[in-house]
Amino acid sequence: MSNRQSEIGVLGLGVMGAALTLNLADQSFRIAVYNRDSGREIGTVSNFLAGNASQTNILGFTDLKDFVSNLERPRKIIVMISASAVDAVLADLLPLLDADDIILDAGNSHFKETETRQALCSKSKIEFIGCGVSGGERGARFGPSIIPGGSPIAFSAVEPYLKSIAAKDKNGSPCMSYVGKGSAGHFVKMVHNGIEYVEMQLLAELYQLLRGSWSNERISELLESWNGGELHSYLLEITSNILIKKEGDSYLLDQILDKAGNKGTGSWSSISALELGSDNSMMSAAVFARYLSSQKETRVRLNLPNREKSDSEIEIPSLKNAYDAARRLNHLQGFELIRLASNEFSWDINFSELARIWTNGCIIRSALMEEVSERFKTAPSLLEDKEYISELGDLENALSESVQDFVQHRIASPAFSSSWNYWIGLTTANGSANLIQAQRDYFGAHTYQRVDDPNGAAHHTNWEE
Ligand code: 6PG
């Protein structure tokens, strides 16, 4: 083995770690990789090196101490392992590191754990960057969207590497940008996934509405035609492809059990929305839809038939506009959640830049994301963007008609329906919360504010007097 020192290390040679390593290798960096050599991971490093023998700039290690010693100081180590294994790896790694070394956690870790790890590392003057990486295996290999957060000084040390492996936007700029201090990177990546859950759920609901009377080919063609215009998105594109993938004579999709899994980021986003007081009903609806999907046995036992349908009953132009409206509301809710967190934790996130780095490489890349990035150049929030809101107003009828289509066909539409409810609630000046306040005051003396008291003072009534 060569004695040369490596400028950057990758710890963890799973699918994503291996892909990131090869991406770094393509940029001619000198890389050290580490993976443990035990249990099911025996041979991981040697197999990886053998499979990529032409990449002479990668050195492989199965001894953590040797791996660390091989890195130039200050050391830069990208940790790409499952979120549940990060603490155990840190416990082994920290005693081997020196002050100013940098650990970059590129997995989907919970942002609160990232904060705890940053505090732990800072005791040894070690920098810990929580970094979102989106784009799946292909993205990691050929250009992901990269969302780092943490100390700006540590970021500047890893910036050249992240920049060169990231996807490029339409102007050729890297889809990588420092988002903020502390756990901002992992928080923002978590919300990215929450938005992703909704984008996927909306497409699943469309599919369910149409599949009763339409062939997979026909649905695929419809989605493909939408994808050619302003609704263009990566998820729309892959869904159109998925619909027509065959296995022998049958569609592969028809052979897949309708039970959706999850690794947690969608529910973490929803919990954060509840904690921060943000209405992210679409995100939580998408998470709950996955949970309900996994109750397969119960659904089979309680099954009731869907209503008879004919395709002439489904208003396709309305459905297209409803999909547009629901996606716009999803992005509005997602970015609002990030805005609340940015204010709460003083992250000072640049939203136009954040949306820009999501225009390529990541799973939620789309024409709408390009538009949102432009809008954030002048509007502090999509809620403040008059044109964005007015377009939603123009799409309201279509959204209402499509929600009715779902109801009439007895097709569940948690994401579409919650987008409609959110939109109507958002644009209703006089809601019903006066009654909620009266009820709270009646049974719990929680007080209420009065419309005829502009000072907003707390009032209480003895309701049974
Ligand atoms: C991405 C993806 C990626 C992964 C998530 C979602 O941005 O590349 O979001 O991070 O697909 O883990 O996973 P679940 O659907 O399993 O929660």
Image (cartoon, rainbow, N blue to C red):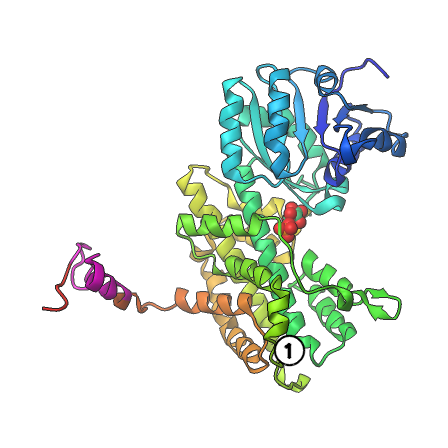
Camera sees residue 181: no
- Residue 200, compared with residue 303, is above or below; it is above
The rendered magenta stretch, by its main secondary structure, is classed as: loop
Which residue does the image show at 61% across and 54% down from the upper left?
196
Residue 187 forms part of the magenta stretch: no
Q: Position of residue 427 (x, y in %)?
A: 39, 67
Q: Position of residue 108 (x, y in %)?
A: 61, 41
Camera sees residue 232: yes
Residue 238 figure quarter: bottom right
Is 153 or 244 nearer to us in this picture? 244
Q: Position of residue 283 (x, y in %)?
A: 53, 57
Which residue does the image show at 70% across and 18% down from the upper left?
68
In the image, is 19 to the left or to the right of 133? right
Which quadrant is the N terminus positioned in? top right
Q: Amino acid at mark 1?
A: Ile
Which residue does the image show at 52% across and 35% down from the upper left?
113
- Residue 389, compared with residue 300, is above or below; it is above
Residue bounds of the magenta highlight: 436-459
Which quadrant is the C terminus positioned in? bottom left
Q: Position of residue 31 (x, y in %)?
A: 77, 25
Q: Which residue is mark 1?
A: 316
